[in-house]
Amino acid sequence: MYAVIKTGGKQYRVAEGDVVRVEKLNADVGSEVTFDEVLMVGEGADIKAGKDAEKATVTGVITEAGRGQKVVIFKKRRRKNYRLTKGHRQSFTTVRIAKIG
């Protein structure tokens, strides 16, 4: 059985036992998190979406929280002696899907 969940403005197709890296969640490592925004639930030809899928919940356990690799932003305007370097590291949370109910 699999489900499509929405969190952090993105959609993820998950199944039981999957490990998913999502946008940062406000919870501690080892705690249980429930995703209520379920867009679709199904297995094979038996698919439920819309109002039927809203009743389902996806439960997971947070296994890791951290920050990704640095992305370097470099801007330059030629012949103007203008150079600008900035960096960004996106925060993430790794979740192991425990149950689709």
Image (tube, rainbow, N blue to C red):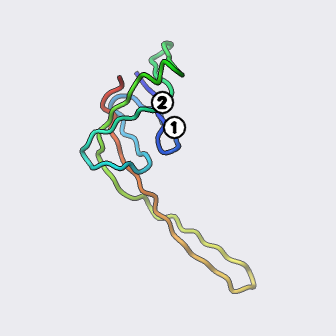
Asked if labels 1 and 2 touch by Cβ distance under 8 angstroms, the answer is yes
Q: Position of 72 compared to 61: left or right?
A: right
Q: Position of 32 compared to 53: left or right?
A: left
Q: Secondary structure at mark 2?
A: strand
Residue appearing at x 41%, y 32% in the figure: 36
Image coords of residue 92 (percent x, y): 40, 52
How would you rate the neighbour count of disc 1 (Cα within 10 Å): few for under 14, some for 14-19, many for 20 or more?
some
Q: Nearer the viewer, residue 56 or 88?
A: 56
Residue appearing at x 27%, y 50% in the figure: 28
Q: Amino acid at mark 2?
A: Val
Q: Which residue is mark 2?
A: 4
Task: Give the position of the C terminus as an image quadrant.
Answer: top left
Q: Nearer the viewer, residue 77 or 23?
A: 23
Residue appearing at x 50%, y 24% in the figure: 40
Task: Give the position of the N terminus as an image quadrant.
Answer: top left
Q: In the rendered image, which quarter is residue 100 located in?
A: top left
Task: Give the CA separation, mark 2 to mark 1.
Answer: 7 Å
Eyeballing the image, is 48 above or below 32? above
Q: Amino acid at mark 1?
A: Gln
Q: Which residue is mark 1?
A: 11
Q: Earlier in the sequence, mark 2 or mark 1?
A: 2
